Amino acid sequence: MKKQTQHSHVSGSDVAATKPRVGVLMGGIGPEREISLKTGDAIATALEARGHRVVRIDVDRRLDETLRKTPIDVAFLALHGTYGEDGCVQGMLETMGIPYTGSGVLASALAMDKLKAKELFRLYNVPTPPYYVVDKDDLGKLEEMHGSFGFPVFVKPRRSGSSVGAGRATNMAELAQRCEEAAKFDSSVLVERFVVGREVTVGVLDGRALGALEIVPRGEFYDYKSKYQKGQSDYHLPARLAPTRYKGVMNLAERAHKALGCRGFTRVDLLVTEGENEYVLEVNTLPGMTPLSLLPKIAQGAGYDFGDLCEQILARATCTMPRTPELSAEPRQEPAKKKGARAEAVPPAE
């Protein structure tokens, strides 16, 4: 028997009004601000096209004031690098009780700190290139600290993203120059053994690898220019690996994601050598979502278009702290207490 359908009298605008108000947090105060603005605009446009109520929020040091003046139901984080991807904004959102996309405070901080991430990789038997760390105040002792570590090496700020301040060094003079450049972005510098191999990145959603993409930069390495300027890199999806190695790379990315306690979505960068070795370089907890970004390319290969990916990420937004009513986009009216009724005890937050 055919089920009789009822005609709805709810308008499209009324339906949209019932959806959560999504604040897309973009920009920030770190060196990756411009890329973050592009990521945020792409995400906001995709969500708007799917009927979501979206508020674009340019993040600065007054973010808490902005969120109190412009209440939202959920935060979609389109931030990159320092003060956005490192747990700082996540901590503020936790305090305010606003659900947000991506990893939590601790996992975000660990992934951003390349030293701590590597220490956890080693603890969980996730292979990563050998390394040491130099503090800015110890740059004068660099030759002594480097010792017999050898060359070539790769130098990075300890806490930064998008290859900002990163570069290769083949001798002590270059190493000193690279460390001074990296130290402009952080108080500590990571010196890592340069491993010759294919650059591969894996998209992970809910702890499951979506696919592996091979990057072939046209420059010396996959630097800021190669990442964000069209035509500076070539891509192969899926990565050109034998089936068994491809499966191994996917598994390794999932292990790295889990080792740092990440949730939602990440992108894991690896090196695959001509021999039998694979190394995890880092885990990106808020990977780029611009038209040139890698996670959307990988997701598309797994059957998600850009809008699908944004909605999948949004659906996984979470917060461990209870929401405070004054910060809700649509605060509820508290029911009137009955005369003579006793106040109920408020249970402690878990």
Image (cartoon, grey):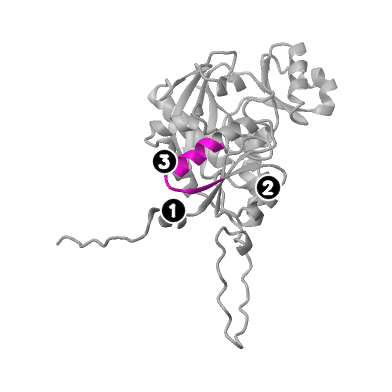
Looking at the rendered structure, which numbered label has been put on residue 308?
3
Residue 59 belongs to the span the image colors magenta: no
Can residue 202 be seen in the rendering of this structure?
no
Q: Indicate which disc, 3 or 2, sits on the residue closer to the N terminus.
A: 2
The residue mark sitting in front, 2 or 1, is 1
Label 3 packing within 10 angstroms: few (<14), some (14-19), many (20+): some
Residue drawn at x 50%, y 26% is: 292
The span picked out in magenta is 40-55
Quadrant for the C terminus in the image: bottom right
Dot 3 lies on which element?
helix
Q: Position of residue 214 (x, y in %)?
A: 47, 22
Dot 1 lies on which element?
helix
Amino acid type at mark 1: Ala
Dot 2 lies on which element?
helix
Residue drawn at x 56%, y 23% is: 227
Amino acid type at mark 2: Leu
